[in-house]
Image (spheres, coloured by chain):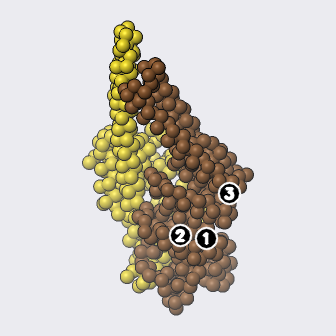
Chain colours: A yellow, B brown
Amino acid sequence: MEVRTLLEVSQPRGRGRWPAFVAGLGMVLAVGVLSMAQRSDGAEQSAQTAISLLMLLALVGLTAYNYHQARARRKEQAQVEAAEELVQLRRWPQAAMALQSVLSRPAYLPMARFQALLYFTSVLSRFHRFDDVIEICDHLLQILPPTAPPVHMIKVTRGMALLRQDRLFDADRAISDLRRFPQSNESGALALLELYRDVKTGHPNEALEMFGVRRDQIARQLGHRVADAYVLAAKAHDLLGHTDAAQAAYEAATLLAPAGELRRRYPEIADLAAKYRQTEAPAEVLA
Amino acid sequence: MTSVQSAISRFRRDLTIGAAVRGSLIFGAIFCLLGGPAGVFSTSALHGTVVLIAICFTWFVLGYRSIQSSRIAADSPLLIATGQLDEAEKRIDAALKGFSLFKANKLLSLHHFAMLRHAQRRWQESALLCGALLRQRMGAMGGLSRPASLLLADNLLHMGDLPGTYAALGRLYQQRLNLAEALTLQQLQLEYLSRVGAFDAMLAGLKSKVQLAELMPSSLSARTHAFLALAALKTGRIKLSDWLRKRAALLCEVQTLLTERPALAELWPNPAEASGGR
C-alpha cells in the first residue's frame, strides 16, 4: 500500500458521540418519568422501577461500550509492540506486514499510530524506500510539538534518508537544524549522521576528528550500531591513504556487524571489502 | 523517606480498605437497583434512586481521585531512568499514601518503589518489596509479575542469595516473556550460571545468545559478551573468548565493566591496555 494512503487511513478515529447521546436521552427520559410520577398519585412505585431499570440499562450499556473500547485499544497496542519486537529482531518482511496491518485502519490510540509510523521508517529504510521515510518523518514533524523528545530522532532519521538519496544540500540544512538543539553535542545519532555526511562529501579529516571525539558516545547510545561509525572511520582512513588505521577500523567494524550488512547500510564503503581483511566470527557463533 | 516495612504494611492495609469500599459500593448499588422494585424503600418510593445516585457520585469521586494519584506516579519509571531519584521518591510516596479505589494503582506504585530502591542499590529493600508484590493476587495486572520477578532475581543476585535467584528465575521460565524481558532474563541467567560455575551451560545455544546480546543496550550487551567470554575462557575455547572479549571492549569502557562486575577481571589482566586498544 502507498505510504500516503496509510498516513491518511490511519488517522485516529474520533471518540464515538453515541454514548453521550444515549446518556442525554436517558436523562430526558428519567426527568420525564419523574414529572409524570409527581402528577399522578400512586405512580411513584412504577416510576422508581422504570428509573432503576433505565439506570441499570445505562450502566450495563456504558460498561459494555467501555470494555469494547478498552479491548480494542489493548489489541492495537499489543500489535504495535509485536511489530516493534519484529523490527528489533530484524524480521523485516514480517514487521512490514504487521505495521501495514496496524496502519491500514483508523487508529484508536494516537500514540500507537505514532509508534507504528516510527517503526515503519526503520522498515522502509531497510528496503531503501527513502522517499517514503522522508514523507513519514515530515508528517510526524508536523503533528509533534517542536520540543517533543522524539523530534530529534525523527530529524536524524530524515537526515540519514536525505543523505542516502544524495540530497546533500537538504541533508546539510537538516544537520544545521539539528545542531540548533540545545543538547546536540550529546547525541550519538547526530554524530553518526555528521560522520556519514563528512565521508560522503569527501571530508575525511573532519570525519576522523568527529570519530575520535564522539566514538564512546556513539557506542554508549547506539550499542552495536557503533560498527557503522567504525566502518565510516575505515573509509575516511582509506581516503587519506592510512591503510593500517583503515585495516584496524574495518576489523573493529566487522567484529560487531557483518560486512554485507554494513555495505547495505553504506554503499560508499563497498570497495573496502576488497582492500581490507574482515574479522571472521568463530565457528561456534556461525553454527 | 518511607521505610520499606511501613510501605508494605500500608500497601496491605490500603488494599483491604479499597476492597471493602469497592464491595460496599457495589453491594449498595445492587441493593438499590433490586430493592426499589421489590418495595424495600417503603417510606418514600424514590428514596432508593437517591441513594443509588449518591453511590454513583461517591464511586466517581473516589475513582477520579484514584486516577489522579496514579497519574502522579505514572512518570516515576522515567524519573528513575533519568536519575531523578528524589523526585521519583516524592511521587511514589504520595501515590502509596493516597487512597485508591483500584488495586492496580497500588500494585503499580509498590512496583515503582521496588524499582526506585533497586536504582538506589538498596537490594535488600527492593527484594522485600518485590516479594510483597509477588505474594499478591495480581488479577488484571498479572503482567506485572514478570518484571517484578526479574527485579527480584537481580536483587537476590546482588545480595549473593543464589538459591533465591534460582527460584525467581525458575518462575520466569514458566511464563511467556516479551523481548525486553527475555533479554534481561538472559543477562541474569548468565550471571547466575557464572556464579555457580556452570560455564558449559552458559555456552549452550551460543548463537542465539549472541544475537540477543546484540539487541541489548550497550552496557548490558558488553556485560553479556564478557560473561560469555569468561565461560569460553574457562572451558578452553580461547579463540571464541578472544572474539567475545574484543566485542565487549568495543561496546563499553573496560574499566567501567570491571567496576560493575569485578568477577570479569580475569578477562582483562591489564584493563588500561584494553581500553587503549579501542
Q: Residue sitting at 68 percent across and 73 percent down?
A: B259
Q: Secondary structure at mark 2?
A: helix
Q: Foreground: A273 or A158? A: A158
Could you say which is closer to the camera, residue A170 or residue B208? B208
Q: Is residue A283 above or below residue A20?
A: below
Relative horizontal placement of residue B117, taking residue B152 as reference (left or right): right
Q: Check if mark 3 and mark 1 are on a common chain.
A: yes
Is the residue A246 above or below the residue A37 in the image? Answer: below
The correct choice, above or below, for A225 with respect to B264 in the image is above
The chain that hosts pointer 1 is B
Q: Earlier in the sequence, mark 3 or mark 1?
A: 3
Rendered image quadrant of residue A127: bottom left
Amino acid under disc 3: Val
Mark 2 residue crowding within 10 angstroms, few (<14) / some (14–19) / many (20+): many
Whether tag 1 and tag 2 are in contact, CB under 8 A, the answer is: yes
Q: Alpha carbon of mark 3 to alpha carbon of mark 1: how far? A: 16 Å
- Given the image, what chain letter belongs to the residue carrying mark 3? B
Say the numbered circle drawn on residue B4. 3
In the displayed orientation, state which residue is furthest to the right: B1
How far apart, in angstroms, are the residues tagged by discs 2 and 3?
Answer: 20 Å
For the point 41% across and 64% down, the residue is B176
Amino acid identity at mark 1: Leu
| Tag 2: amino acid | Ala
Q: x, y (%) of residue A176? A: 54, 47
Is A240 situated left or right of B262 in this image? left
Whether residue B232 is visible to the viewer of this picture, yes or no, is yes
Which residue is at the front of the view, B82 or A25?
A25
